[in-house]
Image (cartoon, rainbow, N blue to C red):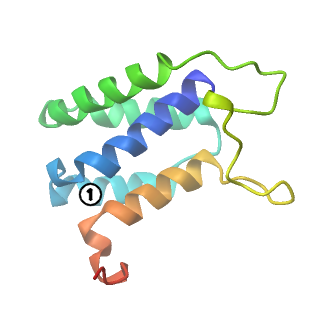
Amino acid sequence: MSVYQNSIQAFIQVLDSQSNLIPIQDWHELQQLSGQLPEDNEEISEILEKWLQSESRNQLLEAYKQHLKSLTAASPIDVDINIGIANSKSQTPANQPSESSKELVDNAIKNNSPLFENTKPNKK
């Protein structure tokens, strides 16, 4: 993965694991952000990192840095071979395009946000 993809993935992991630390006001801001994200990974990464810089989000920023550190510390990937870390393969079938980073972030926000609580399936 590129540096920017790692950054985006680390942000998604923070949403997945630390969503309870995000106040409703910040969820509203994230929802607005997700609707304005560009397709470019570098720009998405910069926007997300800028959002994390608020002093009220120090815990989220620290969690993000930890996730990013663990992602970048993973073993190097041979970019000439179409396999990932630990010889993992893409979860996307070969005949289908993989989700863009923009879609991944948007889905992570929707899946973890209390604003979308009534759209989540009931867990039993």
- Could you tell whether 9 is left or right of 32 in the image? right
Using the image as rendered, state which of residue 62 and residue 91 is in the foreground: 91
Q: Which residue is drawn at 21% across and 32% down?
A: 54
- Position of 34 with respect to 77 (left or right) is left
The quadrant in which residue 89 appears is top right
114 w.r.t. 67: above or below = below
Q: Which of 65 and 75 is in front in this view?
A: 75
The N terminus sits in image quarter: top right
Residue hosting label 1: 27
| Residue 119: x %, y % from top left | 37, 81
- Looking at the picture, how far across and down is residue 46, in whole percent? 47, 29
On screen, residue 82 above or below 111: above
Q: What residue type is labelled 1?
A: Trp
- Badge 1: residue crowd in 10 Å (few <14, some 14–19, many ≥20): some
Task: Name the quadrant containing residue 63.
Answer: top left
Give the x, y percent position of residue 71: 47, 25
**Residue appearing at x 42%, y 45% in the figure:** 12
The image shows residue 62 at horizontal and vertical percentages of 23, 26
Residue positioned 36% across, 78% down in the render: 120
